[in-house]
Image (cartoon, helix red, strand yellow):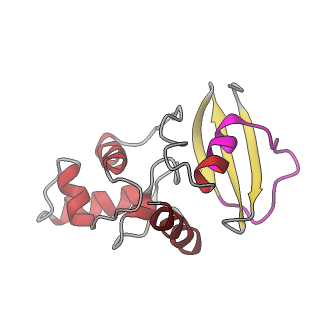
Amino acid sequence: MTPAGIFARQFDSLDCVVQLGIASGRAIDVSFPEDVPPDAEADHELLDAIERYLGGDLSAVDDAELGLTVPTDQRAVLEALDSVPPGSTVTVSRLARIAGLDPADDDDIATVRDALRENPLPIFLPDHRVRDGQGATPPQIAAALRRLENETN
């Protein structure tokens, strides 16, 4: 795996560019710029994994090496996203329970919503599977990912 850099590729099935920030061989950031940045490289195994995922291999992104640097409470929420299988969705309240938080506590619900909104690794940490919480994945891309997962399952 390439130790560090910016990598990006156009994915026609999403009608967007996916950009990865890599440090120490781990993905630390996923974003969706309008165009492929001129300094970005297109060849990276995680971009290949995303391509396989978009082609129907929904487990292709499961073993990605991630460098998740977020507060502990948000980490629990984002890691709980892994328990939501492709093609399924959960509510913010259900995700709070999965993460060990209290869905009746306003502060805990705010933590879940903040974690989703600030998710640095959408696609790898699938915030598009939370139906009543806005994640870091832009709405049109989240809809395309849900559609893909529903069609493939």
The stretch drawn in magenta includes residue 41? yes
Pick the quarter of the image with the N terminus.
top right
Can you say whether 151 is above or below 99 in the image? below
| 7 vs 144, nearest the viewer | 144
Q: Main secondary structure of the magenta part?
A: loop
Residue 14 in the image: x percent, y percent? 66, 66
Left or right: residue 99 compared with residue 122: left
Q: Which residues are magenta?
A: 32-50
Q: Residue at x 15, y 62 (%)?
A: 103
Q: Residue at x 74, y 41 (%)?
A: 6
Left or right: residue 41 compared with residue 128: right
Q: Quadrant of residue 117?
A: bottom left
Left or right: residue 2 compared with residue 130: right
The stretch drawn in magenta includes residue 132? no
Residue 62 in the image: x percent, y percent? 47, 40
Q: Quadrant of residue 60?
A: top right
Residue 73 in the image: x percent, y percent? 28, 45
| 108 vs 99, nearest the viewer | 99
Residue 140 in the image: x percent, y percent? 58, 75
Q: Residue at x 21, y 61 (%)?
A: 94
Can you say whether 82 is above or below 13 in the image? above
